Image (spheres, rainbow, N blue to C red):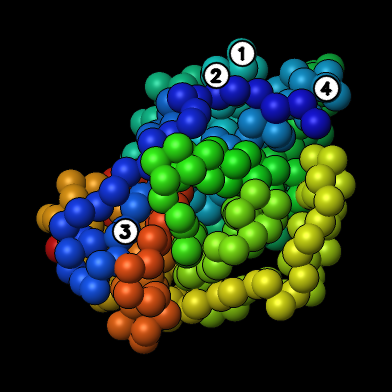
Amino acid sequence: MRCIDFGLAPTSLQELPRLSAMLGEGRRLFVKRDDLLGVGLGGNKIRRFAYYFGEALDRGCDVIVAGGGARSNQTIAAAACAAKAGLPAHLVVSESVGPVVRKLAEFLQAELHFTESSDASSLNRTIRAVCQMLKAQGRSPYVIKPGAAGPLGMLGYVDVMRELYEQAAARRIEVDHVLCCGGTGTTYGGVLLGTKLFHPQTIATAVAIGRRFRHAETLCKDIAKAAKLGGYACPVEPTDVQVHFSCGQGANCPTVKGRDAMRQMAALEGIFLDPLFTGKAFAGLLEMEKAGAFLPKSNIVFLHTGGAVTLLDSFRTSR
């Protein structure tokens, strides 16, 4: 599969000494800084789009159409990647989208199309209408649906796991646990496949930020498809899927624990998380530590998958 190098990969693997001391008993906490990918505002979508945009160019597409919720990081990431690739971008968002997305889209010269609602059915209807309009103009659109989920996107995080375990080996760090935010399951699918391929003794866990997560057998079917696309064997079984729920009232709802985790990360290590994704995921890591999930002297890696747009947008409504 064609992969486009959009950013400054490999991203850094940083030790968090003050948070490690807080965990105690010789545990060492590290963060993989995918929030610092070198295009747009970084984040996990950039890794996925490396493969989606490769497919778009292979198909001869000449315009990107991407949809996302009012507080999604996806649309701006898609527009930034489109700018980097020299393609125009059309973004489908709800009318309730805030000034952060509107202004960043303006900077990126992306065209916004609005829906009354941010639910998937409304966004997809408008995406179809925008595609019909573009086709009537003689263009060939490539669609990135809300969530950017699917096997192709998993390959980006197979690459991240290769990076991570190479970085750890170079520093003689034996990674015992790797944890990431779990939304659609696409990032985690790549994390789990990459872990089983490159360092199978590591436990890979998704911290689900919604009340539901992909069923293990369904997720494994998509992982098998991703492995086939990437030319890998697929050593993943449903019993390998590890999920911890840190969702509160649901995927689009911040939590008190999530905001507390954001403050701890910022105050102790100078790193910003967001209230809907990475903040809740890090809160889940802290919950797991209190429940005894990590043995003394464990090496734990938290994947920082971005969320800058969501963080900035949250300041509109926070008090």
Q: Earlier in the sequence, mark 4 or mark 3?
A: 3
Q: Which residue is drawn at 63% across and 35% down?
A: 49
Residue 86 circle label: 1
Q: What residue type is labelled 3?
A: Leu
Q: Nearer the viewer, residue 192 or 167?
A: 167
**Could you tell whether 240 is left or right of 5 in the image?**
right
Q: Which residue is drawn at 65% across and 23% down?
A: 4
Q: What residue type is labelled 4?
A: Asp
Q: Earlier in the sequence, mark 1 or mark 3?
A: 3
Q: What element carries label 4?
A: helix
Q: Pointer 4: residues within 10 angstroms few (<14), some, or many (20+)?
A: few
- For label 3, the residue is 29
Q: Is residue 11 above or below residue 26?
A: above
Q: Nearer the viewer, residue 215 or 224?
A: 224
> From mark 2 to mark 1, how far is it between C-alphas?
5 Å
Q: Residue at x 38, y 76 (%)?
A: 295
Residue 58 circle label: 4
Q: Earlier in the sequence, mark 4 or mark 2?
A: 4
